[in-house]
Amino acid sequence: MHSAVIGHHITVDSLNEATGGNAVEDDPDSPVEAFEQSIWQRPTSRPLPTENGPVLCFEIPYARVLPPADESNTVSGKKYVVYEVNVRMDSREPDPNPTSIERRYTHFLKLYESLKKDHPTLVQCVVFPKKVLMGNFTAELVGERSAAFEIFLDYIISVPSLRDSEHFLEFLQGDELRKACQLLDERRNEFAVPILENTFRILNKIFLDKSKCVLLVLCRLVAACTTSPIPHPLAEQWAELALRRYEHVCDTDLLVLYIPLLQTCLHLWWQRGRDRTLLEERLDQMGKKGIKVKGGPTLAKAIHALEPRAETI
């Protein structure tokens, strides 16, 4: 596993601001009458591990109640609780760059029900908090749910078949990827990039450096940084990381992205006035092996072919 270099935080509010809409749907089990303007905070941080080496853990430091607002900024409709989920790689010192996402009860419930359906034996030991009709916003209930969610996530990462499931991956990145792809489709790359950066850092703490999900979101990030008329300021940093990660990659599915990645980096190096010799030599070597290196799809199109999303190319 690889610890992220820089921390980042994507909130429901920031997704709403970027996309001009609600990042999440109203929770059907949250009555308006029960709404209180309150914030629950974890009384203490999780203890640090006593063993050597980094240990992955999840922590919910606080939860908040959000009122949805209409276009005139008038609060209306049902309210919902949003849980801040920190992903940390702690050692004897706390992770200096924890990465976080915000999730609701319905996100956790969907994950639990999906895993229970596919892996009933493995999930039978999980005690999942039930829905309630009233009192959704009390500090006591939110605190109990937060503790249960931490235990649930810790258990998932301890069981390889649960950790590597599509349901857990959807929980970790689904909402963010949909929003990022929407923004890319609207040519609003500057808003999509920080969302993809945060998603990469989340996945990079949980999965191996060269795992499919990590490399896919990294390549999507490189594409987002380089498809604007003016490349993103961090385009070279992410492109260089992607090139390093692709060394010795054996996954046949992922190799279809390598040529488009090299071509993208070649163009970026040209834009920045960098020496392109090594990239040109690598492409030439692959061409001599009979691999098509010209006239292929762009990096964005290659990603879309491998993992279609809602964006148009």
Image: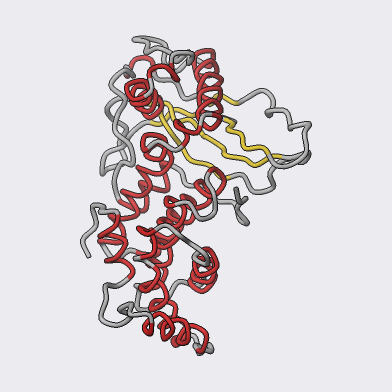
Q: Is residue 103 toward the left or the right of residue 2 in the image?
A: left
Q: Is residue 89 above or below residue 34?
A: below
Q: Residue furthest left?
A: 312
The C terminus: image quadrant: bottom left
Q: Between residue 141 and residue 164, name the one nearer to us.
A: 164
The residue at 62%/40% (across/down) is: 88
Q: Between residue 82 and residue 93, name the one nearer to us.
A: 93
Residue 41 percent coordinates (x, y)? 60, 26
Q: Is residue 140 above or below residue 64?
A: above
What colour scheme was applied to this rendering of the protein?
secondary structure
Residue 263 percent coordinates (x, y)? 38, 79
Would you say residue 79 is visible in this rendering? no
Residue 186 percent coordinates (x, y)? 26, 62
The residue at 35%/58% (across/down) is: 253
Label total for image: 0
Q: Residue furthest front?
A: 289
- In which image quadrant can residue 260 be found? bottom left
Q: Between residue 52 and residue 150, name the one nearer to us.
A: 52
Q: Is residue 313 above or below residue 88?
A: below
Q: Between residue 80 and residue 207, name the one nearer to us.
A: 207
Would you say residue 76 is visible in this rendering? yes
- In which image quadrant can residue 164 be found? top left
Q: Is residue 114 above or below residue 284?
A: above
Residue 246 percent coordinates (x, y)? 49, 65
- In which image quadrant can residue 62 be found? top right
